[in-house]
Amino acid sequence: EDGQLMTIGSDGVVRVWDFERINTADSNSDGIRFEMEPNNELVVGRNVCLSSVVRRSSLPHSFVWFAQDSNGAIWKLDLSFTNTSPDPECLFSFHGGMIQGLDVSKKSHLMATTTLDCSVKVFDFLAKRELTTRRFNQGGTALCWAPAKVSQSGGLLVTGFENGVVRLLELYNPQRLQTITGQSPEGDAELRLRQPFKPHDAAVTAVAYERNGEILATGSADCTVFFFTVGENYNPIGFIHVPEPVKALEWSPHSHVSSVFNHCCCECEGPDLREEDFARNKAIKEEKKKKAKEERLKDTKKLDVEQEEEKEEKEELPPIYIPDPPSPLCCGFYSQPGHFWLSMVLSSFLSSNFLMSPCSSLEMAKQKLQNDQLQKEAELKVSEKQKNLSELQKKFKKVLNDNQNLSEHIRLKPEVQMQIWDVYVCTIPELGNSAALPLKLRFNEM
């Protein structure tokens, strides 16, 4: 408007150009480029990627505009370009992509999140506001809030990034991490880097503390799991290779005798810090077969044999449905010793292009089991009916023989015999109409 053209860009700058000068540019020059300087420009801020702007609708001639930042913000801009124009104001701040990692503090009403937009944010969900943001050069892929056994202040975060780096971040000003927050002024909190280390060659997908808080495990898409001692400085213990990229890590709870961890879904023994020579060992033996697991399997088989002897034979479950390709696992956790739960995501399609989920496959298995039971019940009923029909056929054949031995003037004719048979069948409700036809055919054969 007013002969001016406004442009916005991913560099976070708003520029205003003289449209008349652009429209009357000389196209007969030797080059195909025409250089000019903008009349005005406004730098919104660092790490800003503007995607759209709209004028404040309530005031048509207002210089106030609202801009959308694709990195996760809404800005209020004054485009009057005067000496008294206020600086750009960030009205809302949020992540610019899908959240990759989220965890909640065990000591306060704080929540931390990270995404591939290279930011880590801490929120006070009781006060419904953002406390602080820390930006990095790589996108965040995993996040874990350290337990109270590791950090008494409750302000330590372990964050994994897409380049394989793990960073320990500490929330500054821990005296404000009370059970009930929301009273501190905005801007006081700050995430400070405590220690970085790079154990993996690909994105860090999971981080988890051992149940006693003595060991930190990190999993990655490079099919490795690293272990670190927990202390003032985190030192590497060793690593193991796993068959597939790690999706999630879950240490066994205190109800388990030994410290094991599950990385969806391979179960391995954790390192024992009491062994003197373990610190010198850079690679833990991969995929040990635990005696406890073998004993559990033996006990399970023994229990199955005893149950089969004591109880009647139960209906066999239908075969387990395994999609092709297999559905990826989302997460898992231990419920009790020897048992754990798994969560799966949708992946495979049926031949009719119907998306098969673990829930639908379980529902199909349940329906198949019910259908099999109904089919067996129907077969039993049919067998009972056939038995009754066979006895009825013998009785009726005897009646026919007795009828043939009677004098001709009192003997029943075949037409009358069929009418009597129809009446007799109709008086037996449990036989049903379906039984009449085969008996009539057999009667005609007699």
Image (cartoon, rainbow, N blue to C red):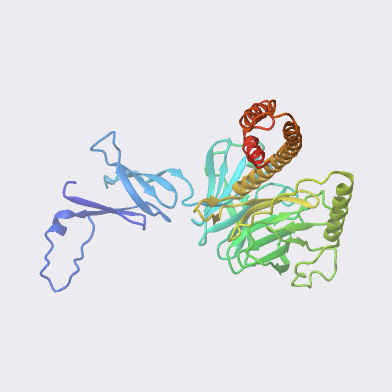
Q: Using the image as rendered, state which of residue 413 and residue 345 is in the foreground.
A: 413
Residue 134 appears in view: yes
The quarter of the rendered structure image containing the C terminus is top right
Image spot of residue 436 (x, y percent): 64, 35
User: Against 277, is 36 above or below?
Assistant: above
Left or right of 357 on screen, residue 23: left
Could you tell me how many numbered marks the image carries? 0
The residue drawn where x is 79% and y is 69% is 279
Which of these two is toward me, 88 or 377?
377
Residue 349: percent from left, percent from top: 53, 55
Q: Is residue 26 left or right of residue 265?
A: left
Quadrant of res 217: bottom right
Q: Where is residue 164 in the image (x, y as percent from the top left)?
A: 59, 65
The answer to which quarter of the image holds residue 226 is bottom right
The answer to which image quadrant residue 409 occupies is top right
Q: Is residue 231 visible?
A: no
Residue 158 rendering spot, x and y as whole percentages:
64, 55
Most foreground residue, 433 or 220: 433
In this image, 399 relative to 202: left or right?
right
